[in-house]
Image (cartoon, helix red, strand yellow):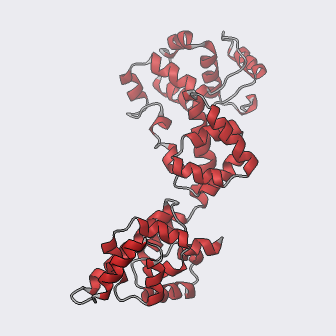
Amino acid sequence: MTTLATLTRPQKAAAILVAMGKPSASRLLKFFKQDELKALIEGARLLRTIPQADLERIVAEFEAEFTEGAGLLDSADKMDTILNESLSPEEMNALMGGAPLAIKDNLPPVWPQVERLEAAQIGAFLANEHPQTAAMILSNLAPTYAARVVLSLEKPVRSEIIKRMMELASVPEAATKLVEDQIRSRVLTESAQKDTSVGQTRVASVLNELDKSQLEEVMSDLREVGMADLDAIRARLFSFEDVPAMSQKARVALFDGLSSELITLALRGTALPLAEAVLSSIGARTRRMIESELGQGSEGVQPADILRARKTVASTALRMANEGLLELPSTQNAA
C-alpha cells in the first residue's frame, strides 16, 4: 500500500487527476507541458492503493477538488485511460518518444513462459495462493502442463482448486492482468534470477551429440576443472544405450510413436540386453517383423545410418521428457 510519506509530487498530482475522474482530468491535461506529462506517467506507474485519509491530505495540499471514493486502486491503469482518451495518437506518440503508453501490454504473453518452468515450482507457488486465484491460473495453462502442476499439489489443496476450476466463470480483464503482473514479478523474475537450467540444457544438447566414450571423456574433464551443476547437466543427458535403464512404462511410451523401420535400423549391431529392452516394449506383431529383419543381417547398411537412427531415438526421448510424457533414468534415480 502506498503511503503519503513515500509519494513524490508527480505521484500526488497523478492521484489528484485520477480521483477527479476523466472529464475534469482531461481538461486539465491540456495545460501540462510534455515533460510534466512524462513525470505524471512515471509517477502513476508506481501508484497503487492510497488510504482515504492520505488522499484527503493530498487534496488539501494541492487545494483542488476531487471525486470522493474509498481510495485509489490501480492508478496506473486509470491514468493510462485518462491519457489515452484525452490526447490524440500523435500526441501520445510524441509524448512517449514513439513508444506506446501501455508498455506492459507489449510484454510477451505470460502463460507460455510459465509453462517452461518446472511444474512443481508452479505447484509450490499455487499452494500459497488463494484457491480461486490458483484455479484461474491453472485454467490459463495448457492442459498437459496444468495436469502435472495439479499432481504436484497436496490432495486437499488439489481438490479445492479443481472444485473452483469447475465453478470458474469469466474472469474480468483487469483481474487477469493483475494476476499476470503478479506472476511476472513473483515467479518469472525470481526464476530468471535463480534458474540456470537454460545454460544446462544448452550444454546438454551439445554433449548429447557425442558418443558414449567421448561423452564420458568430456564429463571427466569438466569434473576436473570444477564445473558446477554437473549432476544437473547429466540429468539432461540421454543416449540410445541408456534405454535399458528406463522404466518399462517410459520405454513403451517412447517406442510406441516410432516407426518399425527406425527401430530396426537403431537395433542393428546392438548387444542382446539392449535389443531385448527395446523389443520387450513394442507389440508382438511388430517385434516379429523387426526380429525377422534383423535376422537377415546388416549387409549394405551404413554405420552412419545406424548412428543417425539411434540419435533420433535419443532426441525423441529427450523431447518427450521435456514435455512431461516420460521420465528419463536420471530423473527417476534423482527421485
Considering depth in this image, is 256 or 107 the residue closer to the camera? 256
Name which residue lies at 69% across and 30% down: 7
Residue 308, image x, y percentages? 32, 78
Name which residue lies at 46% across and 17% down: 85
> In which quarter of the view is residue 185 placed?
top right
Residue 227, image x, y percentages? 56, 79
Name which residue lies at 64% across and 39% down: 135
Considering depth in this image, is 6 or 158 the residue closer to the camera? 158
Residue 236, image x, y percentages? 51, 72
Task: Check the picture and name the quadrant holding the C terminus.
Answer: bottom right
Q: Can I make out residue 43 in this image?
A: no
| Most distant residue in the left direction | 300
Q: Can I make out residue 116 in this image?
A: yes
Task: Check the picture and name the quadrant holding the N terminus.
Answer: top right
Considering depth in this image, is 156 or 63 the residue closer to the camera? 156
Indicate whether 61 appears above or below 223.
Answer: above
Considering depth in this image, is 287 or 39 the residue closer to the camera? 287
